[in-house]
Image: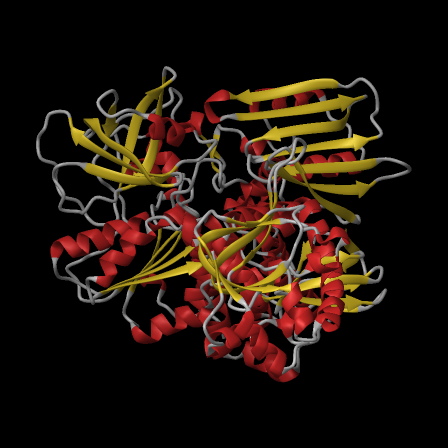
Amino acid sequence: MNVPPTSPTGFLLKTIQACPDLQWATPEQQLQLAARGHHRSLKAGEILFQKGERGESIFLIIQGDLEVYLPSTADLSELIMARLFNQGEALGEWAATREGQTRSASVRARGNSTLLEIPYELIREVGALTGFLGHSASRGQKLESHDTLATASPLFNLMTRQGSARLSYLEKNYSGEAEIFSEGDVSEEVFLILEGTVEIYSADETVRTILGKGQIFGELGVSQSVPRSTSAKAKTPCRLLVLKAQDFLALTRDNDEFAQHLLTLRKIYQTRSSEVVLQFHYQVGEQPRFSSTIQLDGDRKLISDYSIYDDSVSVETLPETGDAIVFSYQDESRDISRRLELHEGRISGARFHGPHPEAGRVVEAIRNDLTISADQIQQFESQGTLFDPGISQDLLCHCMQITRSEIAPGGEVAQCSLEELMQVTGAGTVCGSCRGELASLCQSSESLEMNLLEVSEFQPDIFRVRMTPKNQEPLASFTPGQHIQLEATIRGEKVRRTYTLTSPAGETRWREITFKRDPHGLFSRWLAKAKPGNEVLSVSAPTGEFTANLDQSEPIILLVAGIGVTPALNILRSRVQKGSGPRVIVDHSFHSVATGPCREELLLLTESNPDLEYHPRETIAGQRIQSRDVERYHSLYPAARWLICGPEGFETVMQEKLESAGVFAGNVAVELFHARGSLQQDSLPKDRASLVLGLLTTVFTASVLGMDLLPQSWRDWQSSFAGHWISGSALMVFLGWQWVLPLKRIGRSTGNSAKSLQLHRRLGALSPLLLLLHGSGFGAGMLGLISLLFLTHTVLGVADRSLISDTTRQRQYLQVWLYPHIVISLLLSALALFHLWLILGHGGPS
């Protein structure tokens, strides 16, 4: 439908003036083009022109949404090249300079659109053909480069199909060795390589990665809002596409596929070694993949291949080494399979489908030509792990080194509560991360059999399950934030898992949980497929201390991430149901809008209630919670109760931010239930600062005492009555206080003693300075022994097993470390008390 406009309107002229590809036209020529052009209307799905047709016109968007694409062929599926939707964007000009004036691609309307059609003949008639052809030829070269890259690079194609029009970005050229950015620079741009190669290197000039055409870099700093962690320079002359941070974040927010590609890139960053890594991005059928290559000795290469969507990775060495022996591990209930290929006792290849925590260590084993032992092979075939027996399903409490078989030889314990089990065994009393597993071992005397009432997937992989009592009796109310334990028989075995309740606290008809299906999780996969009416579950009574008191007046602030939002959902629903109570603020971090669990309901709940706040944060868009956000909450609500729930790393960071902001630790509660296997040997917090501090103070004290370096004025004070009592009392108080943590362990305290552990270490590291406070030398006899034991005890105390990463070595070290630590502690305390008794027996210090 072609209708010449009756007169050149200001709007049409504005469209032409907004078109950068018509800037060669004079104002008079622009006016004529607006007056003599034609409207072209397209309905959604209608084709404007097709690849190979003869082009006669250029088109400008007045309003609408169009996409440029290459039609499918026998060999290739349809490929989206660009989207255009801004007023004044042009298409169809390249054909004017191509042989036969043929169209290079097809164009169709994504939505109803209106265009301004300007025939090439009209451009010639207004006297602007030469300028038009010159500009079109230059632009055509750029388009050809773009389309070639979009065809070859799945990542770049994702950018164009989302809405980054073919020429709407900035391009920069760099000469060889030119610096692109430096370590520590503010992360303001993301780069994609159009031509050439780029080196990523560290502060010591070590080359980390070499990237080529179609690869992206600089995205980590932008998405995490942190300075550059490495430097980048052009290895060869190169041309880069440059996206400003805000444009890149908008792209990742709106395009889940693009975001998934970036997450896979991060896996490569996390597992690569110190060698130069070459990265490539390609596609096999419909499955995009990243390939990472490390040059080994001689002609050998190590290639790691990561699938974008199906959570699989393969590792192989080239050239192939000949016949290899294959060893396999499979867990069908979790859809996990792992395969190793060994040649002459060394790994030559590996395949992982599902979680692959040891992929990086397999790469290291290949790099270092590590020989795999028979015991490791046996472990791999039985447990799926090659290096770390700490992943063994038997070890439950990593902090206390307590196994499941020690707690429950028969697979479960007698009827008891979680708190009772912790008091009896001591498990869960350090960091608390294993309490979910402990709860799964408990038999509750208050469990009810319940029928499945509803199983619904209301967001991708996010499910809501409702259960109603089999005896149809009303349920008791519970405290907002509490959890329940579900038990079901799966493949003939009883399986228990703990979930936070999301039904309102006063709901008596059913219990509801909200969970995320783990693609390789046993219970969540089963529950997501369960059919209402066909399954009966055993459901415990609500329990837990991670709760909100809705009768109090102090505000409640929840810092949650991902599916850790479930306590917040429960608390908000309960607060709305109650109709009164404290102000509740929910700060929710999630990957993207599309994956933010329960986001829509939380928005509705808070929009209708002025006492409720919901602050969603898209981390992929750089909206991570910052220290200033925590400080602002604390300044507004200094007496608030804080609840933290999310992945282990998130909880740790939030606790650190609250501590830095000056929030009273007694006002903070942390939900300590994590997915099974998510916490390994790192559950015992590392504290390298205490090790360094302890060694420094020990060496310093030994040097001062051994070389008699204390000033005379200090010695005079030490020999005074006050000096004797003050310094001696300080030493005795310290020795007594150091027994607080062991006594808490012996007493099976159910509190979270992670803070006590850190304080225990830090004060222990500073304790040698107390010797300088009390004495001027090592002393002789018993006094010399006490001094020696004191310094030895300090070094032993700060050099604990948390400094060792390998779990097997941790256990071995613990056996060697624990007994001397205890014996020296007892001996030191006994000698100190005996020394005090002698002094008091002789009338006290003089």
In this rendered view, identify the residue nearer to me: 223 or 118. Answer: 118
Relative side of 118 to 101, left or right:
left
Residue at position x 78%, y 67% from top? Answer: 173
Specify how the rendered protein is coloured. secondary structure
Residue 779 at least partly seen: no
Which residue is at 75% across, 28% downward?
347
Q: Position of residue 748 (x, y in %)?
A: 36, 42
In the figure, is residue 85 to the left or right of 785? Answer: left
Q: Which residue is situated farthest in the top direction here?
A: 492
Between residues 16 and 157, which one lies in front from this camera angle?
16
Q: Residue at x 71, y 33 (%)?
A: 315
Does residue 165 lie above or below 416 as drawn? below
At which x and y percent is residue 401?
Answer: 50, 36
Question: Which residue is at the far left?
Answer: 473
Q: Say which quarter of the image contains residue 491.
A: top left
Seen in the picture, residue 14 relative to 304 is either above or below; the reply is below
* Residue 495 appears anywhere in the view: yes
Q: Is residue 411 above or below residue 665?
A: above
Q: Residue at x 82, y 37 (%)?
A: 301
Point out residue 636 in the picture as x, y percentages from the top left corner: 31, 75
Residue at the right extreme? 298
Q: Is residue 623 left or right of residue 581?
A: right
Q: How many marks?
A: 0
Q: Position of residue 55 (x, y in %)?
A: 65, 54
